[in-house]
Image (cartoon, helix red, strand yellow):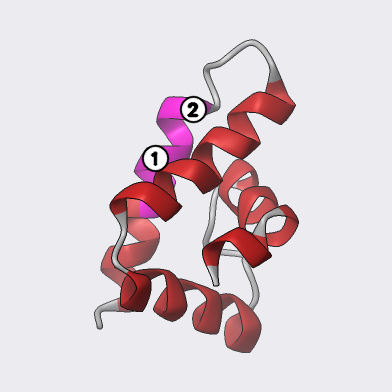
Amino acid sequence: MDTENLITMANRIGAFFEAMPEHEQAVMDVALHLKKFWEPRMRSALLKHVDESGAAMLKPIVAEAVTKHRGMLS
């Protein structure tokens, strides 16, 4: 699994949702999008990357979504 590609895709999703006026809803929507449209192995690879390397490469909204809603993404 190409982690750099996953990070790029996650950041694009984050860029779309961060324009929403309600921040908490936007964070939830990022997590819901990842849950609905990403395969489990893609979500697992993203979570593994965050666990091993941190979330510095992720947009803040994506990092927040992954942190707050990790249970949904596992």
**Residue 43 image offset from top left, x and y in percent:** 42, 69
**Residue with the mark numbered 1:** 13
Assess whether residue 3 is covered by the magenta stretch.
no
Q: Residues within 10 Å of mark 2 (few under 14, many from 20)?
A: many
Q: Residues within 10 Å of mark 1 (few under 14, many from 20)?
A: some
Return the residue nearer the eye: 46 or 5. 46
Residue located 30% across and 50% down the image: 37
Considering only vertical position in the picture, is 56 above or below 13? Answer: below
48 sits to left or right of 71: left
Q: Could you say whether the residue bearing mark 1 is in a helix, strand or loop? A: helix
Query: In the figure, residue 70 lies in which quadrant?
Result: bottom right
Q: Are marks 1 and 2 in contact (CB under 8 Å)?
A: yes
Return the residue nearer the eye: 53 or 46. 46
Please tell me the numbered disc located at residue 65.
none
Please tell me the numbered disc located at residue 17.
2
**Residue 13 image offset from top left, x and y in percent:** 39, 40
Q: CA distance from mark 1 to mark 2?
A: 6 Å
Q: Could you say whether the residue bearing mark 2 is in a helix, strand or loop? A: helix
Residue located 49% across and 27% down the image: 17
**Residue 39 image offset from top left, x and y in percent:** 29, 66
Q: Residue furthest bottom?
A: 52
Instruction: Specify the amino acid type for callout 1.
Output: Ile
Return the residue nearer the eye: 17 or 58. 17
**Residue 42 image offset from top left, x and y in percent:** 33, 71
What segment is highlighted magenta in the picture? Answer: 10-17
Give the position of the C terminus as an image quadrant. Answer: bottom right
